[in-house]
Amino acid sequence: MAGLLVSQQREAELEKSIQDFIEKIAYEAGETRFFLRIHEEGKVLSVGDGIARVSGLNDARLYELLEFASGGSGIVFDLESDSIGVVLLTEQGGIKACEEVRRTGQTASVNAGGGLLGRVVDALGNPAGGEPEIGNTIPYPIEREAPPIIKRDYVSRPLLTGIKIIDSMFPIGRGQRELIIGDSSTGKTSICVDAIINQKNSDVISIYAAIGLKKTHVLKIIEDLKTYGDFSRTIVLAAYASDSLGMQYIAPYSAMAMAEYFMDKGLDVLLVLDDLTKHAEAYRSLSLLLGRHPGREAYPGDIFFIHARLLERSARIAEEYGGGSITSLPIAETQQGRISSYIPTNLISITDGQIYLDAQLFDKGFRPAIDVGKSVSRIGGRAQIKALREVTERLKIDYSRFLEMEVFTKFGAHLEEETSKALDHGIRLREMLKQPRFHPFSIEDEVMIFWIINSGVLDKIESHLAEKAAMEILSRAKRAIPQILERIKEKGALGLADHQSLNEFILHNHDFASGKENS
């Protein structure tokens, strides 16, 4: 009898558990929503030289990301009636004819976020050289509309490079686009690297994009940034010369997308694009491989548009929309100083000014080899701090006049006393404008140096001793009047009392500048 009761109890428990399971399945089935997902697939017609021809994807969009069955990826770059041209982002070794290709419905994106800081990445935001995986990132589209005018604000804050000749004559503001242009090996990259290094003590995040450069050259730049700058606030995006044309093409757009992530967070970003001449060459190669008709110098007709679309995304955003900014320093290379060639003229018309480096000045030892006559900053003067603007307001005019007068002295003409004094002053000014690499100056040091130059005390010593004398006076100022230098750093302006104190300090050091030590 007892065994029968146990058996009935077990049957009841089993029946209850079955009933509970059926009710759970019924509940989950009621909560589940089924939908139909359609994948549009095509086939590879041909592949070669980093380009694939694909059929069957009639609804594909321009710049849409496609996935190949072998694991590769590419971007829709050319739309024709019977096929589309795809620029490959990965090695084409595994992609073959008749292979299946699938649409993703998404534009190409890059990993962006705080996890990229202090890292070297490729054009898709993936770690380069087998480094550890990157966390704390989200996908950001590499193609994006530029901020509308209503969201932009005036460029009113300086982006200090620490390079005296730039901060004084061609100041750059946050949100500006300043082209760095010149022949090969004239110091274009050096200027941009020094500008990144100078952000070591600022709140600016730096992104350096290497486009089509040799890997050894990029590794040297990375080493310099780690040695002299704050690499923890720097991102290096590298699309080497050995990488595919597709990766070289999207590199500046990817770097801009990374910068936009931080700008959207209300931060200021310095973006260096090194260089857009090689980017234009990569785009020309892709266009010729796709069978597009060549235009001037074999570049496609929309070469201007692709660079304008890129650089228009640099801006300063108004405070009510976040307040961030992207300051772009695109680099362009000229051939034998031909600043009027196709790509340089395109970029000059797009940007807000250019800093031109002259090969002859470089060979003469004047570095940075900036040609004052051909360089200009159309916006940055509005962002220059008041103290620096006061001591440099006539600097470019006086220096240009000195260069003109110096030409006439080569003919052995007789010089009046006033002209001779102006030449002596200009020679010493030129010595003070020279600056070694990896030696950026703080803003207070720059103001003090130009104050010393304007005082005329350096005109009383030999020109080759001018820099040494100025640095000694600056060192004494840091000990004697540190409060004035601190006010320049904090407020960017000087009062009448500060002017008087600086003049008295210079007068007190007059004997030293003449070659005698003060008692």
Image (tube, helix red, strand yellow):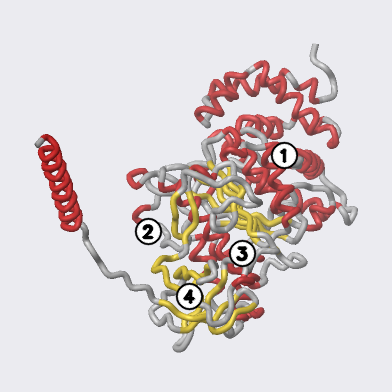
Comes first in the chain, label 2 or label 4: 4
Q: Is residue 442 left or right of residue 75?
A: right
Q: Secondary structure at mark 3?
A: helix
> Residue 248 shows which numbered tag?
3
Dot 3 surroundings within 10 Å: few (below 14), some, or many (20 or more)?
many
Image depth: mark 2 or mark 3 in front: 3
Question: Between residues 112 and 337, which one lies in front from this camera angle?
Answer: 112
Q: Is residue 17 above or below residue 312?
A: above
Comes first in the chain, label 2 or label 3: 2
* Mark-to-mark CA distance, 1 and 4: 49 Å
Question: Between residues 244 and 505, which one lies in front from this camera angle?
Answer: 244
Q: Which residue is mark 2?
A: 148
Image depth: mark 2 or mark 4 in front: 4
Name the residue type under label 4: Val
Q: Residue furthest top?
A: 519
Q: Which residue is mark 1?
A: 438
Residue 491 percent coordinates (x, y)? 50, 29
Residue at horizontal 41 percent and vertical 43 percent from the top: 266
Residue 32 percent coordinates (x, y)? 21, 58
* Mark-to-mark CA distance, 2 and 4: 36 Å
Q: Secondary structure at mark 1?
A: loop
Locate residue 460: give its quadrant.
top right
Name the residue type under label 2: Pro
Q: Secondary structure at mark 2?
A: loop
Name the residue type under label 3: Gln
Dot 2 surroundings within 10 Å: few (below 14), some, or many (20 or more)?
few
Query: Can residue 390 be seen?
Result: yes
Comes first in the chain, label 1 or label 4: 4
